Image (cartoon, rainbow, N blue to C red):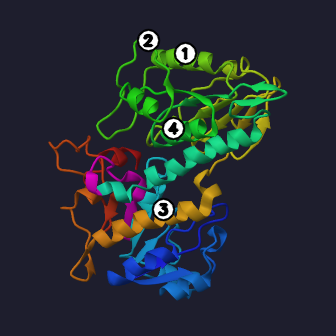
Amino acid sequence: MKIGVPMEPEGETRVAITPMSMKKLLKSGFEVLVQKGAGVSSNYSDSAYEAAGAKVVSRKEALSCDTVISIRYPGLDGISKGTQIACVADPFRNPEHVKECIDAGVTLLSMDMIPRRLSRAQSMDVNSSQDNLAGYKAVLLGAAHVPKGIPMMTTSAGTVRPAKVVIMGSGVAGLQAIATAKRLGAVVYASDVRKSAAEQIESVGGRFIEVDGMDDFEDESGYAKPLTPEFIQKVNDTVCGVASDADIIVTTARIFGRPAPITVPSSAIANFKAGAVVVDMNADVGGNCEDTKAGEIITTKNGVIIIGTSNLPGTLATTASMLYSNNLTTFITSLVKDGELIISDEDDILVGAPEGSDFYVNGMGGVLLCHEGALHPKQTRLGGAL
């Protein structure tokens, strides 16, 4: 069994497998071939891979392996029929990649579709591991750009009041953002459309922003449900009102497979105070802030700074790669049975839990999108996109 680890495309600083994962992979019977220089941007040298037992090879050799593990979809140039690709394929936004794999007879394992409510999947959940880091870094970016101190300071020259931070959305990224802002000494307010999030927000030091008429808008897989335009407007008005005098605003609202919802319209930005910093964590999928420009930091006419960094985990490439590698190593070694990598329809991590169970969600769940040249039958919603 051979695993190939190619270099990621330009702009992606992470690497899919790190030297620390070699021991577990080798013990499970894998031979690991890493493209020369693949780990350099995340501070993992070729010599570190070789010392850990991997082989440093050309891209062609890495892509010729039975299984290719990457972060971004690597494309099929150099990949042959029967190969397994494990990556973050983002299939609902990139259905052409799924079709390409079907036509080529390549198995596509999309790690962003891990059924996160299965307890066995927690250690494989790349969404959570990367979102956690993104929430942490978002607050640090906000703190670095806001023109004032964060904690309360009592000095001989006077008392400095703590900064006010508002976190919009309190999933994995949001909770880490709240905790990070609290550790820095800020007063933190946070919102979420899931009423169940109130207790979680308060447990990490935040103050819950409640919206009149709020229900528990959470689907069976743990994601926020799409909201009506009327309620979205109500949430926007309430939370942006709280944020109007905030120093840092972090937006985290992301709906699986859909464009990011606008939670900070231009009209709200116009009412934010000069020097306020908005960190938009979803610039890569359209942005939560109407004025966000992906990959840019801009300042509006009224002095509000909007940060649209597109790959927040990639700004912490060493740690993000280590966590992603741990997720993928746990996942891929779980598929090994009697010295062979087995893709089985009986594995609820791969195809989702059985219909009728607590984890079955409209045919969704499971990382396996296509196998043996066909769309997996449970991926019914994807069928419409293809």
Q: Which label's residue is closer to the chain start, 1 or 2?
A: 2
| Residue extent of the magenta highlight | 105-120
- Compare marks 3 and 4 and give the one earlier in the sequence: 4
Q: In the image, what residue type sits under mark 1?
A: Thr
State the residue position of label 1: 238
The residue identified by callout 3 is 323
Residue type indicated by callout 4: Gly
Distance between mark 1 and mark 3 Cα atoms: 36 Å
Residue 81 falls left or right of residue 243: left
Q: Amino acid at mark 2?
A: Asp
Who's the residue at 85% across and 27% down the image?
157
Name the amino acid type tagged 3.
Leu
Q: Is residue 88 magenta?
A: no
Q: Which residue is mark 2?
A: 212
Farthest top residue in view:
212
Can you see residue 270? yes
Q: Earlier in the sequence, mark 3 or mark 2?
A: 2
Q: What percent of the width, then of the height, locates residue 372?
A: 30, 69
Q: CA distance from mark 2 to mark 4?
A: 21 Å
What separation in Å lies between label 3 and label 4 (alpha carbons)?
18 Å
- The answer for how far apart the CA atoms under marks 1 and 2 are is 9 Å
Residue 342: image quadrant is bottom left
In this figure, which residue is indicated by the disc labeled 4? 174
